[in-house]
Image (spheres, rainbow, N blue to C red):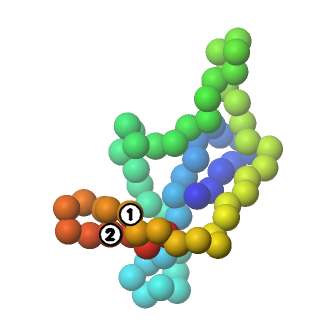
Amino acid sequence: MMASANSMEVGVLGLQDDQISWEQWTQEDAARAELPLSVDKRETLPVGFGLDTSTQHELPWGELEALSL
């Protein structure tokens, strides 16, 4: 996952098939993560971002594939 200090959207990065190069995975509009609006309906922006990669889970991806996270 990736975030920018000037955008409320959160993106997803993944390894290409060669397991060396990174690429941005494009999500459908309904599947994109976004930060919530503030109480007064203004956009909120990230000030920091943490990601724990210590555990791995296999998630279904389509009907016949799975992602190892």
Residue at image location 47% in from the left, 68% down from the top:
57
Q: Above or below — where is 62 with respect to 16?
A: above
Tell me the SS state at disc 2. Answer: strand
Q: Is residue 64 left or right of residue 9?
A: left
Q: Residues within 10 Å of mark 1 (few under 14, many from 20)?
A: few
Residue 45 occupies quadrant: top right
Locate residue 16, reporting x and y percent. 43, 78
- The residue drawn where x is 70% and y is 15% is 39
Q: Residue furthest right?
A: 47
In this rendering, is residue 10 above or below 53?
A: above
Tag 1: amino acid = Leu
* Residue at disc 1, secondary structure: strand
Tell me whether the residue at label 2 lies in contact with that at label 1, contact meaning CB atoms closer than 8 angstroms: yes
Image quadrant occupied by the N terminus: bottom right
Q: Give the alpha-carbon distance from disc 2 to disc 1, as whole Å.
A: 5 Å
Residue beneath disc 1? 59
Specify the label residue 66 is tagged with: 2
- Residue 35 quadrant: top right
Q: Give residue 51's position: percent from left, percent from top.
A: 67, 61
Q: Position of residue 50 (x, y in %)?
A: 72, 57
Task: Specify the amino acid type for callout 2.
Answer: Ala
- The residue sitting at 31% across, 62% down in the picture is 61
Q: Quadrant of residue 17?
A: bottom left
Q: Is residue 23 visible?
A: no
Q: Is residue 65 visible?
A: yes
Image location of residue 15, percent across then percent down: 48, 76
